[in-house]
Image (cartoon, rainbow, N blue to C red):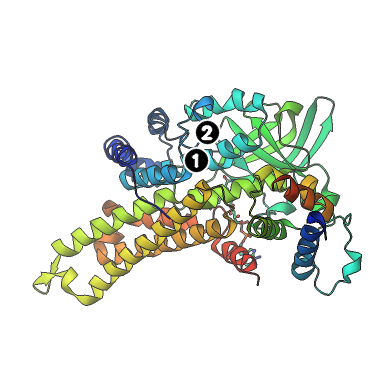
Amino acid sequence: MDFAWSEEQTQFRESVKKFALEELNDGLRERDKRSEFNLEGWRKCADFGIHGLPIPIEHGGLGADPLTTVGVLESLGYGCKDNGLVFSINAHMWTLEVPLLDFGSKEQKQRYLPRLCNGSLVGGNAMTEPGSGSDAYSLQTTAERRGDRYVLNGSKTFVSNGGVGDLIIVYATLDRSIGPNGICGFLVERDYPGLQVGRALEKMGLRTSPMAEVFLENCEVPVENRLGREGNGKNLFTHSMNWERACILASAVGAMQRLLETSIRYAKDRKQFGQSIGKFQLVATKLVDMKMRVDQARAALYQTAWLQGKGKSIFLEAALAKLTISENWVRCAEDAIQIRGGYGYMVESEVERELRDALGSRLYSGTSEIQRVLIASLLGL
Amino acid sequence: MTHESSAMSIVKEFILDEFLPGEEPSRLTPTTALVSTGILDSLATLKLVTFLEQTFDIQVKAHEADEEHLNTLHTICELVDSKR
Ligand SMILES: Cc1cc2nc3c(=O)[nH]c(=O)nc-3n(C[C@H](O)[C@H](O)[C@H](O)COP(=O)(O)OP(=O)(O)OC[C@H]3O[C@@H](n4cnc5c(N)ncnc54)[C@H](O)[C@@H]3O)c2cc1C
C-alpha cells in the first residue's frame, strides 16, 4: 500500500484548505442558527472543482482517483467548518453523481453530469420513507409504467438537499410482490408534475444542509429517466451506498484533525492550578486518544480508497471506514468540549456545533448498528 | 473435470455452505433461481461478489451484481468465465 502524496496532490490539497479557510466560514454561526444553506459557498466549491472530483473530465469533472478524491475532501473538511455545506456536497456526489455515472445511459450522463459538476444543479437521493429506514428495501413508493412514462406514488422523508434540489434519484417499486427485486431508481427533476417538496425538516446538527420530505402524487417521469434496468434498483442503491460509506466521511477526518489541533492549543494556553491544563495527565490522555482516533479514521479512509482505486470490491472496508470514522468523530468532538470545560459548552466556542454535526454521521448512510450487522455478516458470522 | 464445471462446483459449494445450510446438494441445480427467490438477498450478494473476486481473481462491475448475472449457478459461471 502506498499512501504517499505526490507534489501535485499535496499542492491541490493545500490550495483546497486555503480556499476553504478563507471563503467558506464567514457567517456560519448565524447560518447554523437559521438553518440556512450557503448557496454562494456551494457555487464556490463547484467552481473550485470539488463537486466533480471523481467524475471523468469528459463529463465535466476532474477525473481524480478515489485516494486523491478523499484526500482533497479531507482538506476541505479541515478548512471548512461548515460541516452542513460539506455534507450537502457529499450527498450530491455520492448519492446522485456516482450512481448516475456508473448506471446512467450516455444521454443521461450528457444531460446531467456537467451541470451537477459545475454546481448549477443541486441533487441527492430519496430512499428513506416514514415506514422504511434501515430496512430500506421494504419501501412502499410505487412506480407504474404507462406508455412513455412511469407514474410514481408515495412519500419520502429525510431527503438531504430536498428543499433546494433540482434532481433526485427516487427509489420506487415496480412490483411489491417480488420484494427488493422490484425496486428501480428514477431521475426525477424538481418540476416534474406530481412532485411536491414538503416541509423543511429542522435538524439537531448539519443545520446548514437542507432536508425535506418529498411527496409523489402521480408524479410523471419520462421512461428515459429510469436509471438502469427495471428491477435493478437494489444493485444501484447497494453500489451508491458502498461509495457513500467509503467516501462520505472523508471531510470528517479533516474536521477531526482541526478539533485535535485547536484542542492541543487550548490545553497549552488554559491555565488552572498554576499550570497548563495539558500538563494534567487526565487532560493529556484525552488528547492522546483524540490523536489515536484521528489516525485510525484516516488509515481506514485511505486504505478503503486505495483498494477502491485498484478496482477491488470494498464492501467490508467501506462499512468499517464508515463505522470507524463516525464513531471516532463523535468521541473527538465530545473530548474537544470536555477539554474546554464550560467554554466548550457555549455556542460561541463553536465546538458544541461540531458535536451536533458529528452525531448525524452515526445515522446516515446506514446507522452504526447496521454497519456492524453488515461487517459481522461479511466476516462470515 | 472441465474448467467451467470446476468453477461451478466451487461456487455451488460456497452457496450451499453460506446461504443454504442443510439443503440437499442435488436440489441446487445450474438453473435454480437464486436472486428472484431471495436466496441471494442484498447482503448475500455482497458476500458472493467478494467470494467470486477473491477466488477467481476477477473484478465484478457494479452493474453486473444483478439478477441477470447472478440468478443461477449457470449465469454466475458464465460471468466468471467471461472475465478469465
Ligand atoms: C443527517 C441525515 C441525512 C440523511 N439523508 C438522507 C437522504 O439524503 N436520503 C435518504 O433516503 N435518507 C436519508 N437519511 C435517512 C437515513 O438513511 C436513515 O435515518 C437511516 O437509514 C436509519 O433509518 P431510520 O431513521 O428510519 O431508523 P430505523 O431504521 O427505524 O432504526 C432505529 C434504530 O434501530 C436500529 N436498527 C434498525 N434495524 C436494525 C437491525 N437490523 N439491527 C440492529 N439495529 C437495528 C437502528 O440502528 C437505530 O438505532 C438521512 C438521515 C440523517 C440523520
> Taking the image as drawn, is residue A33 in sight?
no
Classify mark 2: helix, strand or loop: loop
Report whether mark 2 lies on the same chain as mark 1.
yes
The total of numbered circles placed on residues is: 2
**Quadrant in the rendering for residue A35:** top left
User: On the picture, is A1 further left or further right than A285?
Assistant: right
Placement of A135 over or under A128, stated as above or below = below
Residue lying at the far front of the rendered structure: B1
Q: Tell me where residue A217 appears, x and y as whole percent.
A: 74, 35
Residue, disc 1: A210
- Choose top left, top right, bottom left or bottom right for residue A339: bottom left
Which residue in the protein does label 2 denote?
A164
Locate residue A234, reporting x and y percent: 71, 48
- Circle 2/circle 1 CB separation < 8 Å: yes
Q: Chain of mark 2?
A: A
Numbered tag placed on residue B38 in the rendering = none
Residue A138: give x, y in percent of width and height. 74, 54
Check disc 1 and give the amino acid type. Answer: Pro
- Residue A154: image x %, image y %? 73, 42
Viewer-side residue, A197 vs A254 = A254
Residue type indicated by callout 2: Val
Q: Give B63 or A340, whichever is nearer the viewer.
A: B63
In this rendered view, identify the residue nearer to me: A98 or B12: B12
- Judge whether A75 appears above or below A374 on screen: above
Residue B13 lies left or right of residue A72; in this view the side is: right
